[in-house]
Amino acid sequence: MKLKFTKMHGLGNDFVVLDGINQTINLDRQQIRQLADRHFGIGCDQLLLVEKAKGQADFRYRIFNADGGEVEQCGNGARCFVRYVHDHDLTKKSEIRIETLSGVISPRLERDGNITVNMGKPVFEPKQIPFIADRCALTYQLEMLHTQVTICALSMGNPHAVRVVDDIASAPVVTEGALIEKHQRFPNKVNVGYMQVIDRNHIKLRVFERGAGETLACGTGACAAVVAGINLDLLDYQVVVSTQGGELTISWQGHDAPVWMTGPAVTVFEGEINL
Ligand SMILES: N[C@@H](CCC[C@H](N)C(=O)O)C(=O)O
């Protein structure tokens, strides 16, 4: 089978994007892992599939981690999705509605080329994250080997655990992050963010992503970190998030307001691969 693909990234969080409208795509888990493999495939953190909407939205957006698992949401991918459907003449609308596994999101292409996405409301109810806890709280203690770590647990459509650290450079993102990702209190596993607060409008963030490992940036991780920081009264409502791959602007007015994310989306190259 020959597949046309586009390689894209949002702040270095990289994607293989496939047009599932003009080509028939039925990939199994093993084939997705092969495409995502950086040595034997194209290489990416996530594979994104562009499909026709099932309901009233403009498109359906499916997201697969590098390990082949399908997931609910991807913020950097949402911006690349918009760039892709424009560049491939699949729409002329600057604001589109996209179905995801976690509901409809609405990204907007800005005049400066950046993309702003309404990422929906954060969810704190443990059952919906999902996170095993008997009550809803700002922070939780997670029992880990012989110690306890403090996390904020929330969902941005996908599950996140956020840790506040003093120094982002020495944060145990890969070691501890990998343990929290598979912690028994997160039945569907979790993305683990480490945030250093620089001031009330600026954080540094590294994320160990579920099913992908540490990435250069994570859009939903940036939303989750800012929401957690606002709830802990460490941050104001609009925050610049510095990741290893660049900067995102995230804003949240609290309570039932949606989280807004603005940042770039870049096409790297197009190609065709035999599977
Ligand atoms: N890179 C993404 C998140 C991708 C999905 C995540 N790894 C998960 O399993 O939920 C982003 O930019 O949000």
Image (cartoon, rainbow, N blue to C red):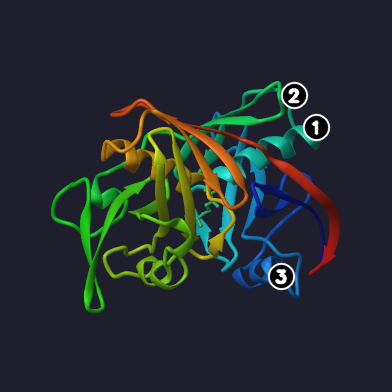
The disc, 2 or 3, on the residue closer to the chain's N-terminal end is 3
> Residue at 40% across / 37% down in the picture?
199
Where is residue 145, by image quadrant? bottom left
Marks 2 and 3, how far apart at CA? 33 Å
- Seen in the image, is 127 located left or right of residue 244? left
In which quadrant will I find the C terminus? bottom right
Query: Which kind of residue does numbered mark 1 sit on?
Result: Asp
Mark 3 residue type: Arg
**Residue indicated by mark 2:** 92
Where does residue 251 sit, x and y in percent of width and height?
A: 44, 30
Residue tagged 3: 38
Mark 1 to mark 2 CA distance (whole Å): 7 Å
Point out residue 89 in the picture as x, y percentages from the top left corner. 80, 32
Tell me the CA gap for discs 3 and 1.
29 Å
Q: Nearer the viewer, residue 213 or 196?
A: 196
Q: For marks 3 and 1, give the one nearer the viewer.
A: 3
Q: What element carries label 1?
A: loop
Secondary structure category for the residue under label 2: loop
Please identify the residue farthest to the bottom as the structure is shown: 146
Disc 3 element: loop
Residue at 29% from the left image edge and 48% from the top image edge: 128
